[in-house]
Image: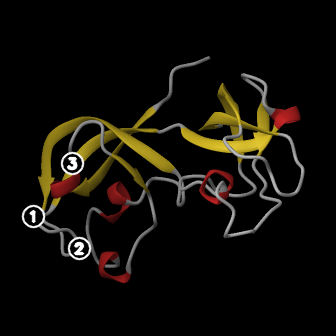
């Protein structure tokens, strides 16, 4: 599988450390008049990213305490439960949630942070069976997903 592409973006200096993972949530109204707004908001909303390299470039920022620092990020893999028949390494899937049972112990694996429902992903690894039996009787597998 091809190596993940990196992007340069800006993140709050307090969080700018190699290995930190975050879900990009989009811009806020305080960003409207910022001259480097495009550099901060060049990621895909709802996706999970990992900081690979911290650069020395620093900018003042009205949103982030101590300003913003340039970093190189790559999309981080996300652990999720998917239907067993789709759990094949290197297969492309469209992530869809078919259960909204919030009290289920596997809810956070069926609705993982960093996954956008309806987007396409590649199954990077099959980690095993679901940790719990699905109440809906579905056969599920625990997988690692990467964005397409």
- Front-most of 113 and 141? 141
Alpha carbon distance from label 3 to label 2: 15 Å
Alpha carbon distance from label 3 to label 1: 11 Å
The residue singled out by tag 3 in the image is 16
SS at circle 3:
loop
Q: Is residue 30 above or below residue 139?
A: below
Please report the residue visible at 27 percent of the width from the left and 62 percent of the height from the top. 36
In screen coordinates, is 56 left or right of 82?
A: left
SS at circle 1:
loop
Please report the residue visible at 67 percent of the width from the left and 70 percent of the height from the top. 102
The residue singled out by tag 2 in the image is 63
Q: Nearer the viewer, mark 3 or mark 2?
A: 3
The residue singled out by tag 1 in the image is 66
Res. 20 image quadrant: top left
Alpha carbon distance from label 1 to label 2: 9 Å
Could you tell which of marks 3 and 2 lies nearer the N-terminus?
Answer: 3
Please report the residue visible at 23 percent of the width from the left and 73 percent of the height from the top. 63
Q: Tell me residue 7's x, y (percent).
A: 40, 39
- Front-most of 134 and 13? 134
SS at circle 2:
loop
- Front-most of 105 and 115? 105
Please report the residue visible at 75 percent of the width from the left and 49 percent of the height from the top. 95
């Amino acid at each position: 599988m091809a190596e993940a592409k990196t992007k340069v973006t800006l993140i709050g200096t307090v969080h700018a450390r190699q290995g930190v993972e975050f879900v990009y949530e989009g811009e806020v109204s305080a960003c409207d008049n910022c001259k480097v707004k495009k550099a901060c908001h060049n990621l895909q909303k709802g996706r999970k990213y990992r900081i690979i390299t911290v650069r020395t470039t620093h900018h003042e920022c009205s949103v982030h305490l101590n300003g913003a620092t340039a970093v190189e990020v790559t999309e981080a893999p996300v652990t999720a439960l998917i239907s067993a028949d789709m759990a094949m390494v290197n297969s492309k899937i469209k992530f869809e949630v078919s259960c909204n049972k919030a009290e289920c112990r596997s809810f956070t694996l069926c609705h993982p942070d960093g996954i956008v429902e309806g987007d396409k992903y590649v199954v990077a690894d099959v980690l095993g069976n679901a940790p719990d039996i699905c109440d809906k009787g579905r056969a599920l597998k625990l997988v690692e997903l990467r964005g397409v």
